[in-house]
Image (tube, rainbow, N blue to C red):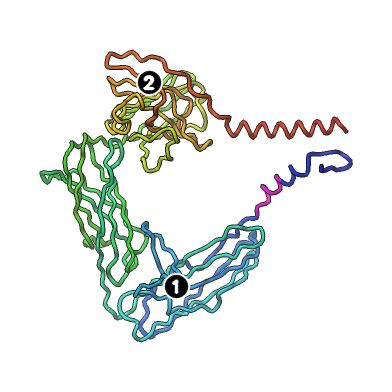
Amino acid sequence: MTFSVNGQKKIPWISIIVVFAVLCILPVSAMTLSSTRYTGTIAAGEIVTYPITIGTQSYDNPTDYTIAVMGFGQNQDGVYIQLDPGKDTSPNSARQYISLDKSEIHVEPGSSQTVTATIALPPNAGEGGRYATIYIYTVPSKGQAVTTAVVIPVMITISGTKTSTAGTITSVGTGEITVGQPITVTTSMKNTGNYHYLHTFNMVTVTDAGGNIISNSTTEPSARAIIPGNTVQYTLKPDVKDIEPGTYTIDSKILLESGTVLAEKKTSFTVKTDYVPPVTESSITLTPGSAGTLTSPDGRYSISFPQGAVLGDVVVILKPYSNDKLKPAPANANLGATSFEVSGLSGLLSRDATVRVTYSADDLTAAGGDASKLKLAYYDAARNTWVILPTQVDTGSTALTATTNHLSVWAVMVSSSTTTTTGATGGIAPVATATKSPVPVEIILMSIGITVIASGNRFRKQK
């Protein structure tokens, strides 16, 4: 079936239906709140009220909201989460002390409704703090599949009672130490007191076998409170420079905002090969009329741009990239140990650049000691895939070289496909031509557009 106006034959109905379905996804209404947190000091036996005004913008849809009192939980990053009543088993819970005058409301565009929470502490409420969340979420209307939800933390201090501030570090670890990647110290701590605390921070000191301090680093103070009974994780990347193989000690402390040590734990880690820290960020300004080379300060990475590689002045930046952020390797390959990012370009280069990377001992280990399996690869975000390039390997200088017009996130890959290898005598032989890449999504969409236009013209000619 086709669609026509004034007797003119147009494109088929199915095309219109598809376009309409794509364009007419109903938006989710925004939510405005008069308050996003309750913190108060309440005496045992006292009753207080906490009003919450929930509103929408004038351009929103009419919205139905559900409001519920839930338990107070946290994930390892400290983010507050609501707990179902069946999972709220904390002795510091305030959920049973809070009631709402409304559990459902309807809000018209540009207006608001107020829900009042009543907090009634019993005479035997105990000591320290009591905690709950008020969970507000939208009820999806017809045509909507997504809801908007907000968790309002309720943190109550019982006045006139003793607060116990205590914590226990349950674990400290570094994970695997990899050349060219930051050493990451992860510390998990449980609040074993009866009260919450804000703005805690983690201090990590690294010493060598002789007791010499090689790094002393701290995190920024936490923006979220740690609730009794919950365990949160602190992640810190100490500023560790080149270090030799050996055993090193980590002293991890969690401190209160005042600087008082809340908890402390020591552990050790072993460096098996000479450790090299991540690449330091560097940049170059490219111009169309001249060639240029972007080189990392340690000389491990370089990108040589020929004259005419860019059409206008552009600043290209080379910076570190953590392996834990890399997308998984394709089925025919495995990730090595080296990764980095090149940014600043909004598109492709006009002429290919030459990328040169010094592979590490960890890269070689990942390849089972066979350097010929090492490849350079970049991640193509538009196609959501890794592109493994034909790579020249020079085992004498431990260098990988490839040419490309695409600069993004890069990694050393281990792949069994053929790679030309040379030794210490130099002279890098040419490599095989790269496999033809799949057709980009942009080209496919352009082709579809041209087909639709051509179909319209054909219909008009048939008239």
Residue 23 part of the magenta segment:
yes
Residue 398 figure quarter: top left
Q: Circle 2 — which element?
A: strand
Sequence-earlier tag: 2 or 1:
1
Mark 2 and mark 1: Cα distance apart in space: 61 Å
Q: Local crowd at mark 2 within 10 Å, few (<14), some, or many (≥20)?
A: many
* Vertical comparison of 328 with 364: above or below: below
Q: Please, what is the three-letter code of the amino acid marked with disc 2?
A: Gln
Magenta-highlighted residues:
18-25
> Dividing the image into 4 quarters, which one contains the N terminus?
top right
Q: Give the residue pinned by disc 2.
A: 392
Question: Can residue 38 be seen by looking at this rendering?
Answer: no
The residue that appears at 32% across and 62% down in the rendered structure is: 231
Residue 425 vs residue 415: left or right? left
> 252 or 115, which is in the foreground?
252
Q: Give the residue pinned by disc 1.
A: 85
> 218 or 247, which is in the foreground?
247
| Spot occupied by residue 180 in the image (x, y as percentages of width and height) | 30, 35
The residue that appears at 78% across and 39% down in the rendered structure is: 11
Magenta highlight: main SS: helix
Total of numbered circles in the picture?
A: 2
